[in-house]
C-alpha cells in the first residue's frame, strides 16, 4: 500500500515537473496538468479516496511560481527568503469552492475548470 502511494506521488511530481517546463499559456498548462493528474489519481486510488482526486489535482496543478527574494536595499541587512503565498491560497480556496464541482471522472471538464481557475486569479490579484 505504501509503495502505491509513493509511486502515485512520483508520477504526479514527474508530471508536474515536465509540465512546468512547457511554455504554454497558464490555462492550457492547468488544463493539461489537471486532466492528466485526474487520470493518474483515478488509476492509483479506489473509491472513497478517489473522491479526493479533483481537489488533490487542483492543489497539485496550482503550484505557485516562487519569486526569487529581492535584494536588500542596504548591505547591512540580511535578505529574507520570505515568500508571500497569499495569492496561491486565495486561488486554491476560490477554485476549491467554485471550480472542483465542475469536474467529474466521466468528464474531467478540464477547460471549464481552467477557465474557472483563471477567474479566481483575477479575483485574488
Image (cartoon, rainbow, N blue to C red):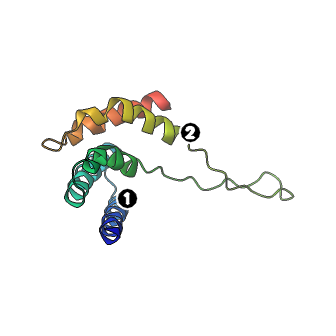
Residue found at the far left of this picture: 106
Q: Count the marks.
A: 2
Question: At 37% across and 59% down in the image, what residue appears?
Answer: 20
Determine whether, in the image, residue 25 is placed left or right of residue 104. Answer: right
Residue 15 lies, in percent from the top left, at 31, 62
Question: At 33% across and 72% down in the image, what residue appears?
Answer: 3
Residue found at the far right of this picture: 76
Residue 25 visible somewhere in the drawing: no
Does 109 appear above or below 72?
Answer: above
Q: First in sequence: mark 2 or mark 1?
A: 1
Q: How crowded is mark 2: few (under 14 residues within 10 Å), some or many (20 or more)?
A: few
Foreground residue among 110 and 7: 7
Q: What element carries label 2?
A: helix
What numbered label is drawn on residue 20? 1
In the figure, residue 106 lies in which quadrant? top left
Instruction: Quadrant for the N terminus, please.
Output: bottom left
Q: Name the residue under label 2.
A: 86
Residue 17 lies, in percent from the top left, at 37, 63
Q: How crowded is mark 1: few (under 14 residues within 10 Å), some or many (20 or more)?
A: some
Amino acid at each position: 500500500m505504501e509503495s502505491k502511494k509513493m509511486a502515485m506521488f512520483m508520477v504526479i511530481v514527474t508530471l508536474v515537473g515536465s509540465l512546468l517546463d512547457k511554455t504554454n499559456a497558464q490555462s492550457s498548462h492547468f488544463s493539461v496538468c489537471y486532466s492528466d493528474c485526474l487520470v493518474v489519481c483515478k488509476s492509483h486510488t479506489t473509491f472513497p479516496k478517489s473522491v479526493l482526486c479533483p481537489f488533490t489535482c487542483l492543489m497539485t496543478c496550482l503550484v505557485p511560481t516562487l519569486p526569487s527574494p529581492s535584494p536588500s536595499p542596504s548591505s547591512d541587512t540580511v535578505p529574507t527568503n520570505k515568500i508571500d503565498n497569499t495569492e496561491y491560497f486565495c486561488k486554491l480556496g476560490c477554485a476549491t469552492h467554485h471550480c472542483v464541482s465542475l469536474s467529474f471522472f466521466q468528464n474531467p471538464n478540464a477547460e471549464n475548470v481552467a477557465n474557472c481557475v483563471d477567474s479566481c486569479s483575477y479575483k485574488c490579484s
